[in-house]
Image: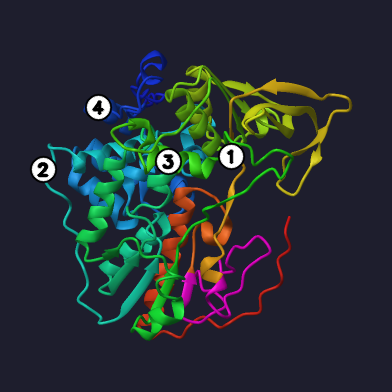
Amino acid sequence: MTAVKIDLNRVSMPKQTPDERIYNFDEVAQGYQYDQALIEAKRCLNCPKKPCVEGCPVGVDIPEFIQEIVNEKMEQALAILKDKNSLPAICGRVCPQESQCESKCSLAKKGAPIAIGRLERYVADWELSDVANRRLKVAKESSTGKMVAIVGAGPAGLTVAADLAKLGHTVVLFEALHVAGGVLVYGIPEFRLPKMIVGKEVEYVQSLGVQIRLNSVIGKMLTIDELMEYGFEAVFLGSGAGLPMFLNIPGENLTGIYSANEFLTRVNLMKAYLFPKYLTPLEVGDRVAVIGGGNVAMDSARCALRLGAREVRVIYRRSRAEMPARLEESENAEEEGIIFQFLTNPIAFIGDERDTIKSMKCVEMMLGEPDSSGRARPVVKPNSEFMLDVDTVIVALGTNPNPLIPSTTNGLQTTDRGTVVAESATGLTSRSKIWAGGDLTTGSATVISAMGAGKRAAAAIHAYLSGEKESKQYEVAQVTKE
């Protein structure tokens, strides 16, 4: 019997060349064509134990949907995807599959794992294309008469909304901004996640019967307790983590220094890159420094380049090996000419006579013993101070939750970081009938982890609304700030 030869190399995805894309905000990755998707799908071993599914936070039956691509049955592939994931076109673009489902792929032991994320994107984009010419019709349970309020239309909130609507509950989603999508629309650039894609996925959630109320700041317009007085029998908090962290060093209030949150919100949601068509001017100098090493830092640096900066540096206090950004994003940034300056940390910002940033004082770092994150702790190298001329600085150090909802909701327990304390398995908070998930409970994390938390909370909320006994209230140990 002749052994089947397995291709250990994945099919490359077409993308814009660096020389083209640095001058536009169009999507960089172009997605698979039909023949490419078919070749890549046929690499799947269809393992009986499905190790890849273990790595998926929302539990998509990955081998099953890939086999339907091989069978050229796209509707079935889409149905399998959407059974567990209501936002596949988004996840296929921005989720870190390399550290989740793809890391568990059996082929990864000898070669490149199946490009699960790219195939997910291919199927989702097929639904949105003219080829499909219609959206998948999803079966819904009959109405339960139960009302659920969801705060925040980001990935966690949209996931909970879709799951509960399919189960027959009446769902009203309250969003503070004028567009639904949360971090998907204000935090991720057009060249990584087009707003049209997010809009289509939001439309799908609405097609399930979910009502979305925009410009609704819960904690100001209504409190959580007032929502319950209006007849909502359960509340899910998915308001994210939009409060930026800063360095807290001298000069940080100088003109020309942005938080990554403000910078990306102005670029993405307020379309500063289309000024003067959209009246959101955003001044970016010739020499830009981005402080941080995550995906937000990569997004900020690449946006600054497209807005006209001549030199963009990513300043990171650890080495390349510790950088948390996805490899694909850091590689794209380097291809575009972004300079990476590792083992460097700013200690002061220097302004000119107009109080505008002109330089920053930095120190060189060395790596010491691992800290609580498991990464090598950076320590200052003695006598290593130096100056770096800059016109614009973007601080991308992460975010914490806004305190508005916890401060207006009695009995809602939080940590020293301001995150809401919730059971990891169910999302239940210290208040009965209130669940939470996503960045509000973890601090800034990934889209797919927020969606996973949303699915677990939706299941727990449904169980509660269906008459099952609510999880026993628990004593929560005080969590100290790292």
Query: In the rendered image, which quarter is residue 70 located in?
Result: top left
Q: Which residue is mark 4?
A: 33
Q: Which residue is mark 3?
A: 266
Q: Which residue is mark 2?
A: 133
431 part of magenta stretch: yes
Taking the spot 53% from the left edge, 60% from the top edge, the residue there is: 440
Q: CA distance from mark 2 to mark 4?
A: 17 Å
The tag earlier along the polypeptide, 1 or 4, is 4
Foreground pick, 438 / 142: 438
Q: Is residue 247 visible?
A: yes
Q: CA distance from mark 1 to mark 4?
A: 35 Å
State the mark number for residue 337. none
Provide residue 332's location: percent of width, then percent of height: 47, 24
- The stretch of residues the image draws in magenta is 407-435
Foreground pick, 89 / 379: 379
**Left or right position of 377 against 103:** right
The tag earlier along the polypeptide, 3 or 4, is 4
Q: Is residue 12 above or below residue 423?
A: above
Q: CA distance from mark 3 to mark 2?
A: 34 Å
Q: Secondary structure at mark 4?
A: loop
Q: Nearer the viewer, mark 3 or mark 2?
A: 3
Amino acid carrying label 1: it is Ala
